[in-house]
Each structure stands twice: as structure tokens, then as C-alpha cells.
């Protein structure tokens, strides 16, 4: 073969390699479409969705469908999106949720698969799906929890509060979200979080609390002593002009006792002070009676609150 023929052969080989490189590059850029397709229950529909959209964006020319599919699988496995899990099985598996419940009278400590530490207050529930740590880092909280989130710039950690959510990348914060209370709140200990609802999104800094009225959607940000909002993790709870209803809700969970209000007026009575879970229920109730014009009377299996 003469020099010219050899040059042509090398040029053709280089062009082929370049074509392969750019084809694979386009496939890699389409990895997000593969993730979207994974939300479809039937794998055949998922592949159709990805393939048709890629064909419209980047004609694959000389690469056959099965070569393309094989390349997609190889890249996905390499970047770890479906690591240790068969892709077809991933598509077939429905999203399932696990619920972790902190028993009444106790605090539960757990570590999620991404390394995030969570302390659940008594009677609180944390929910997450089988895709946590793979497709997302999304949890749902009912009650109160202290999060110490592992930083991951590529996969933000989100906490679902119903109509609102908290987005973080790595930080420590306390969340309180009880279905029976109109106010939900987030207190930031360190790092930075973004709070989103239907009206706006707000970033807060360490030492700040953001509160939202579930009824109106109104958001309020103020400075607080974070230790008072995280002290429940060591069995103490501080109340600063908060309603007797909120206090009673905590007592029900700490002491596993049902309370009943004789009238709605007493629910709004305000309480300021500290209660300690190590103290007996009788001792705590006497302290509350001294600071509020209320009485606690045993009635059947409940504790009746009167004024």
C-alpha cells in the first residue's frame, strides 16, 4: 500500500473513531432521559420513550438500536445510577415506601443509606422510597426530626412537609411538622437550606427559624436559640409562649397518655418554661398547673384538662 492509501485508511479510521466518540457522548448526555424513563412501570415503554426522543435529537446514523441500547446500559452501569441492580428489574420495580416510627416515650436514631443521620422525636414518622440514594434523596416527615445531612452536590436532600419542602446539600437542621398543628417550622443549626412553598422560596442561615402557616401559606423568619429547638434530643423541651395544645401533644408522646380538653379555650393558653422527660408525669403536670390557670383531672383512661 502506498503512502496515500495508508493515509486514507488512517483518516477513515480516525473519522470512525470520532463518530463513535460523539455518538457515545450524545448517549451520555441523554442519561437524564433514561432516568425519566425509569419512572414508567413497563420497561418496553421506557426504552421506546428514550429511544424516540434521542432519535429526534441526535440521529444515530450507523449505530444500530441494539448497539445504542448496549452503550446506554454500559454508561449507566459505569456512572453508578443503577449500580448493583439489574436495569430491567429497576424499571419493573414499583416505587415502595418504608415508614420508620419512633415509639411513644422514646427517641429513635437511624442512619439512612446515604450516611445521613436522623433523630426522630417520640411518635414521629419518617418515610422514604426504595429509590432513596439512587434516583433521589427524598424523605417525608410527620412529627419532628433532627437531620444531619451528608453533603452531595449532585443529589440534593429534600424533606417533604406536605405543601412545602426543604432542599439541602449538607447541613444540620430541625424540622417540626405535625398534621394536627397549623404551623410547621425549620430551625437551621449549620449550613444552608432552601424552604419552598407555593408562594415563594427562602434561604435561611444558621440561627434562623422559618415558620409557615399551613392555612395561609404565610412565611416568617426570625432569629432563635437553636439549642432550645434541639434539646428534645436529650429529653428536654423548651416552650416560649407556645400554646397548651402544643405542650399537651408532646406530653402525650413522651408519657403515652391521652389528654382531653374540657373546652377549646384552654387549648390556646400560653406556656413558657422547660419540661424534662426524666421527671414523672405528675411532677410535670403540677408545674404546668402552677404557671397556667388549668387543672388536670384523671377521667377514665384519659387526663381531662379544665380551667
Image (tube, grey):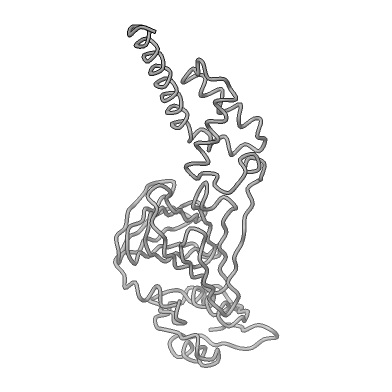
Q: Position of residue 287 (x, y in %)?
A: 46, 90
Place residue 272 in its image quadrant.
bottom left
Most foreground residue, 135 or 16? 16
Residue at coordinates 42% horizontally, 61% vertically from top-left?
Answer: 149
Most foreground residue, 198 or 99? 99
Q: Position of residue 9 (x, y in %)?
A: 40, 12
Most foreground residue, 60 or 133? 60
Decide: is 86 above or below 162. Answer: above
Q: How many marks?
A: 0
Q: Position of residue 83 (x, y in %)?
A: 54, 47
Decide: is 301 above or below 35. Answer: below
Residue at coordinates 51% horizontally, 93% vertically from top-left?
Answer: 283
Decide: is 304 above or below 80. Answer: below
Asked whether, in this view, residue 143 is left or right of residue 166, the answer is right
Residue at coordinates 54% horizontally, 73% vertically from top-left?
Answer: 108
Q: Position of residue 33 (x, y in %)?
A: 51, 33
Asked whether, in this view, residue 170 is left or right of residue 268, the answer is left
Which residue reaches farthest right? 300
Residue at coordinates 57% horizontally, 59% vertically from top-left?
Answer: 127
Give the quarter of the figure containing the N terminus. top left
Which residue reaches farthest front? 1
Amino acid at each position: 500500500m502506498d503512502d496515500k492509501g495508508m493515509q486514507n485508511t488512517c483518516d477513515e479510521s480516525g473519522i470512525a473513531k470520532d463518530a463513535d466518540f460523539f455518538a457515545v457522548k450524545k448517549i451520555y448526555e441523554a442519561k437524564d432521559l433514561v432516568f425519566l424513563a425509569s419512572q414508567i412501570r413497563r420497561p418496553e415503554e421506557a426504552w421506546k420513550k428514550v429511544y424516540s426522543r434521542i432519535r429526534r435529537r441526535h440521529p444515530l446514523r450507523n449505530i444500530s438500536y441494539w448497539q445504542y441500547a448496549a452503550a446506554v446500559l454500559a454508561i449507566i452501569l459505569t456512572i453508578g445510577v443503577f449500580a448493583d441492580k439489574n436495569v430491567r428489574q429497576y424499571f419493573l420495580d414499583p416505587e415502595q415506601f418504608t415508614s420508620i416510627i419512633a415509639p411513644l416515650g422514646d427517641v429513635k436514631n437511624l442512619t439512612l443509606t446515604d450516611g445521613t443521620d436522623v433523630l426522630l422525636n417520640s411518635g414521629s414518622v419518617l418515610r422514604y422510597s426504595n429509590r432513596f440514594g439512587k434516583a433521589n434523596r427524598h424523605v417525608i416527615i410527620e412529627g419532628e426530626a433532627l437531620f444531619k445531612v451528608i453533603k452531595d452536590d449532585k443529589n440534593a436532600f429534600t424533606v417533604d412537609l406536605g405543601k412545602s419542602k426543604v432542599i439541602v446539600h449538607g447541613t444540620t437542621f430541625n424540622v417540626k411538622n405535625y398534621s394536627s398543628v397549623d404551623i410547621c417550622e425549620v430551625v437551621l443549626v449549620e449550613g444552608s437550606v432552601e424552604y419552598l412553598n407555593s408562594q415563594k422560596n427562602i434561604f435561611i442561615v444558621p440561627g434562623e427559624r422559618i415558620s409557615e402557616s399551613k392555612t395561609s401559606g404565610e412565611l416568617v423568619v426570625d432569629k432563635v436559640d437553636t439549642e432550645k429547638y434541639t434539646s428534645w434530643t436529650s429529653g428536654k423541651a423548651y416552650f416560649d409562649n407556645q400554646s397548651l395544645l402544643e405542650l399537651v401533644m408532646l406530653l402525650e408522646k413522651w408519657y403515652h397518655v391521652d389528654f382531653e380538653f374540657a373546652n377549646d379555650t384552654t387549648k390556646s393558653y400560653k406556656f413558657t418554661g422547660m419540661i424534662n422527660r426524666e421527671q414523672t408525669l405528675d411532677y410535670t403536670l403540677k408545674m404546668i398547673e402552677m404557671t397556667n390557670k388549668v387543672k388536670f383531672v384523671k377521667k377514665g383512661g384519659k387526663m381531662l384538662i379544665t380551667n
